Image (spheres, helix red, strand yellow):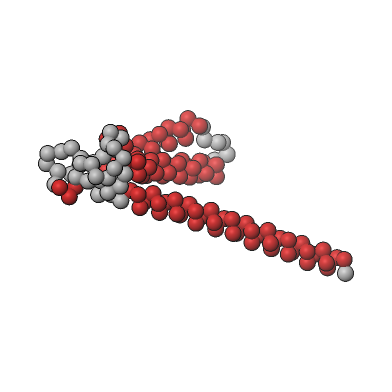
């Protein structure tokens, strides 16, 4: 079974119909399921996003548990180590039959839904605030 990284995908053309060069790969595994750029985006998402989340959680825990702030070198080294671990995990997770385009599109869709929920909730809070202040104003004026 062959595993791929961003560098291995970069030498192919932007087409899903090219063959992966190998003598002993079965025919059903010779074609990529998505364009190579989607595999690169997937490997970046699977390595950078969890590493940033873990570093942020470590930063928050360090702020709550101790009075002194954690040094930036410790946070930086933790980020590099976690990025390396998640990059290796992404290397083993992403295969030619991996549906990278669908995963990237679902991630973008989730970001849009999250942004929409934030926008709607802020709008509702503004409306409630204006409504509350108008009630207070009319109670004082009458």
Q: Tell me what residue is drawn at x 55 percent, y 42 percent.
A: 63
| Quadrant (top left, top right, bottom left, bottom right) of the C terminus | bottom right
Report which quarter residue 37 is drawn in. top left
In the picture, measured across the screen, residue 59 lies left or right of residue 20, that is right
108 over 18 or under it: above or below: below
Measured from the top left, where is residue 136 in percent x and y? 80, 64
**Total marks drawn?**
0
Residue drawn where x is 78% and y is 64% of the image: 134
Residue that sits furthest to the left in the current view: 24
Q: Residue furthest right?
A: 142
The answer to whether 40 appears left or right of 110 in the picture is: left
Residue 128: x and y in percent read 69, 63
Residue sitting at 35 percent across and 36 percent down?
84
Residue 54 appears anywhere in the view:
no
> From where the camera sits, is residue 66 visible?
yes
Closer to the camera, 123 or 80? 123
Above or below: residue 138 compared with residue 110: below
Q: With respect to residue 75, does 92 lie above or below?
A: below
Q: Position of residue 113 (x, y in %)?
A: 49, 56
Residue 71 % position (x, y): 51, 32
Q: In the figure, is residue 22 to the left or right of 138?
A: left
> Is 89 in front, or is 95?
95
Looking at the rendering, which quadrant does residue 6 occupy? Answer: top left
């Amino acid at each position: 079974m062959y595993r791929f990284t961003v560098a291995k995908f970069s030498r192919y053309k932007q087409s899903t119909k090219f063959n992966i060069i190998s003598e002993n790969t079965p025919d059903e595994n010779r074609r990529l399921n998505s364009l190579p750029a989607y595999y690169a985006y997937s490997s970046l998402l699977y390595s950078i996003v969890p590493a940033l989340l873990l570093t942020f959680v470590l930063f928050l825990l360090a702020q709550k548990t101790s009075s002194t702030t954690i040094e930036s070198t410790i946070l930086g080294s933790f980020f590099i180590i976690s990025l390396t671990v998640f990059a290796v995990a992404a290397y083993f997770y992403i295969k030619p039959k991996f549906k990278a385009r669908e995963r990237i599109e679902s991630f973008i869709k989730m970001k849009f839904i999250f942004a929409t929920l934030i926008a709607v909730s802020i709008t509702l809070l503004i409306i409630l605030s204006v409504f509350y202040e108008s009630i207070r104003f009319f109670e004082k004026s009458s």
